[in-house]
Amino acid sequence: MTDKKIRHLVSKPNRDGTMRHYWQPTKALRDAGFHPVKLAGTLGEVIDQAEVWNAKVDDFYKGTTPAAAVKPDTVNWLIQQFQQTPEFKKLGARTRQDHIYYWGIIAAWCGDMPYKHLTRKAVKFWLRGIQKKSEAMAYHCYLSGSRLYKFAMGDFLLDLNPFGKMEIAAPAEREVVWSWDEIEIFRAQAVKMGRRSIALALTVAYWLSQREGDVITITWTKWTGLRFELTQRKTKTPIAVKAVDDLRHWLEETPRGDALQIVVSETTGAAYTADNFRKLVAEIRDAAGLRKELQFNDARRSGATTLGEAGCTEDEIRAITGHKDRKVLNRYVKVNPAMADNAMGKVERLHEHRLRAKAGGGQ
């Protein structure tokens, strides 16, 4: 078809050997209002049509999509109003995507309702129904709904936030940590499957303790040959981290193509999309026979835990992970027996030092 992979472009063979083409949005995009589109014409025309739809998606996530005609003063209208504000556009790309996704779920329930008519009782009953299926889904709908109505209270002088201060429990914090053996098994399997780039991504995420979004978009310009110097996309926190030998080895063995990014797909020669990246990570994990609960994002927690296991101070760990709050850091560093052994080793060395000092003083 084409050497360059076009986002959301799906081609299927017909019985006569010709191809039919579709622009196929992801589930998140479908929930946000995009629908599959059958494309026609020459291959070049099909690609052009797909790119037009991809541009609409990009504008949608940037919050620059012109508002479609919706009934004024409805929940759908309120969502559109917030998306057009500088406040929304200043949010991180992932945060905007998450809000849009969960607003889509809210809109499917009450989008045509006047936003002032939505009551706390109705919201609570609805969220409890979702909670029975997914506590995480209910919690994130609650957060996004609350954020939406906080905007309504500020800009439209609404007196009450129907999503405000609900007793919706946050999903249990993830405790999953990659062991070093699992990382090596995953990397070997990724290379075997022709996806060395994903093995490299896991290596970067683990040793730098960085988020998936930063890892798959990081460019060679951020690598000095000794350390990474970058600014985190979510928090805008500047990070400068020296690479350990294992990471440096993987980087030195990575060929630099035309792409600016360090992590580049072997099939497209371009950076991965988040959806495709996660799909491939799961395929490699399963092929390697690793635990199903392992996710790529757990590598950040795993790296932070390793730093703690090595005896690094909280401030040293935060200098690498970029956490500004020590309390937040506690969610990432998971205590383990090795840390306890390290602590007792320090105590033992301190005790031996005291004994030697006492013995020396008595001479």
Image (spheres, rainbow, N blue to C red):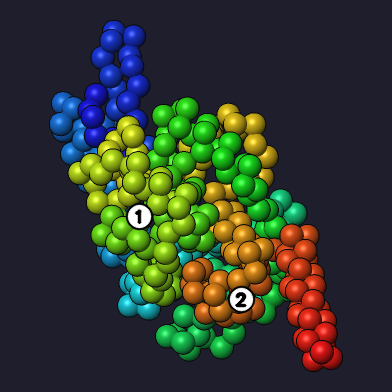
Residue 5, by quadrant, is top left
Residue depicted at x 46% and y 65%: 95
Which amino acid type corresponds to the residue marked 2 in the rendered image?
Answer: Thr
Tell me the mark number nearer the camera, choosing from 1 and 2: 2
Decide if residue 355 is on the left or right side of residue 143.
right
The answer to whether residue 143 is visible is yes
Where is mark 1, residue-wise? 217
Could you tell me how far apart the alpha carbons at marks 1 and 2 are, in whole angstroms?
A: 29 Å
Please tell me whether residue 275 is drawn above or below residue 39 in the rendered image.
Answer: below
Please tell me whether residue 151 is drawn above or below residue 62 in the rendered image.
Answer: below
Where is mark 2, residue-wise? 313
Which amino acid type corresponds to the residue marked 1 in the rendered image?
Answer: Thr
Decide if residue 187 is on the left or right side of residue 326.
left
SS class, disc 2: loop
Marks 1 & 2, CB-CB < 8 Å contact: no
Q: Residues within 10 Å of mark 2 (few under 14, many from 20)?
A: few
SS class, disc 1: loop
Please tell me whether residue 271 is drawn above or below residue 309 in the rendered image.
Answer: above
Quadrant containing the N terminus is top left
Q: Which mark is residue 314?
A: none
Relative depth, front residue between 208 and 132: 208
Specify which label sits upstream in the sequence, 1 or 2: 1
Relative depth, front residue between 263 and 360: 360
| Image coordinates for residue 92, horizontal then vertical, percent | 40, 68
